[in-house]
Amino acid sequence: MKAYIRSASCISPQKTFRSENFLADIVEYNGTRLSTIEPDYKEFIDPKLIRRMSHVIKMGVASAKDCLIQADIEIPDAIVTGTAFGCMEDTITFLTRMVEQNEELLPPTAFIQSTHNTVAAQVALMLKCHGYNSTFVHKGISFESALIDAIMLLREQDANNILVGGTEEMVDTSFKILTRLGLYRRKPTSNLELLLTEAKGSMGGEGAVFFLLSDKASEDNLAELSAVKTLYNAQAIEVGIEQFLAENNLTPADIDLVITGKNGDLKNDTIYKQLGLSIFKNNNIANYKHLCGEYSTSSSFALWLAANAIKRGIIPQITIERQITDKTPKKVLIYNHYLHKYHSLMLISAI
């Protein structure tokens, strides 16, 4: 069954939130991590509640509400989110106080808001949405798992309009740990040079992206989400991609644009280079992680990019790695992997 992207809202390190300027005014960062450009949250959240909300909760609630406003929907039938680390800021606050106060007289707020499903729960509470509510914590394929669940709900006719999101925040503690593990670079660089200066590690990132998925086709929809597939520890990814396309009656030649998860890390990008010389040798290729950074649910930014590229009929120049044809993108394939274990494929088509 087909799912349609009715609207999308993205808070990222770029000017993507409520911006008509589709990645034309790019923000450059010099360092080892990218931080989101935050909107005026008072437009979406009661000021009395804002002060008790962590960074990721504010991002998630604002992007979710904006997504519903765009679609002219007050209450969705279901809310499904994906996150790998959840509310890191509240988790670290609670654990720190636990140590400092010898596990006595601990304020409960940070603990209550430290759970992974806090963003989905807060959105539901504010909207008074009593429908299906679920959060997937599947590491590098958390967002894709949320999409698959939403598609199943549409297929089973348990819901007609589903709010689906991917959220992640970067805090100092988690950034230090992930840098120590080799995911991020130690030497500062420009995000605009990230994919050109290959080294060990990438740049840290964060963001919140929400989509409203519907089972009804409409000219107002951004695009059609034709298929989603996840692969764990895939060894022959080229075969997996060809099978995925074959399942949807397509070949690589039918794809107008391939969006990859290239992030500037030598080891990470090897597979993307190989694919660019083999099954995707005749395809236009674009990248996105130099704009939002590397994080577990960054593929939600890629889906936002693909849906808008199809709707607007343009590919932002800053994303293009190789352009063989000037063909308007009608079918876009997103391939991303996280730590070489969590592989995902998303097929997006024009309405």
Image (spheres, rainbow, N blue to C red):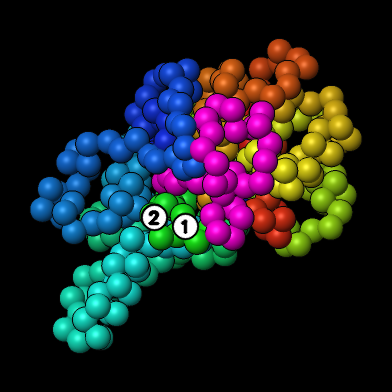
- Horizontal and vertical percent for residue 290? 56, 34
Amino acid at pointer 2: Asp
Badge 1 amino acid = Lys
Residue 187 shown in magenta? yes
Q: Is residue 93 above or below residue 38?
A: below
Give whichever of 8, 320 is nearer the camera. 320
Q: Residue at x 25, y 69 (%)?
A: 110
Q: Residue furthest top?
A: 326
Q: Is residue 133 above or below residue 278?
A: below
- The vertical placement of 30 against 152, above or below, is above
What's the residue at 73%, 22% (across, down)? Answer: 322
> Residue 203's x, y, as percent?
54, 42
Q: Which residues are magenta?
A: 179-208
Residue 167, disc: none
The percent coordinates of residue 25 (x first, y second) are 43, 19
Which residue lies under the disc numbered 1? 176
Crowding at mark 1 (Cα within 10 Å: few <14, some 14-19, many 20+): some
Screen quadrant of the C terminus: top right
Q: Which image quarter: residue 122?
A: bottom left
Can residue 321 be seen by looking at this rendering? yes
Q: Nearer the viewer, residue 52 or 345?
A: 52
State the residue in front, 64 or 213.
64
The residue at 43%/45% (across/down) is: 207
> Can I make out residue 132 in this image?
no
Q: CB under 8 Å between callouts 2 and 1?
A: yes
In terms of secondary structure, what is the magenta stretch mainly?
loop
Q: CA distance from mark 2 to mark 1?
A: 6 Å
| Residue 258 coordinates in the image, percent (x, y) | 71, 32
Label 1: which secondary element: helix
- Residue at numbered disc 2: 172
Left or right of 91, for residue 220 = right
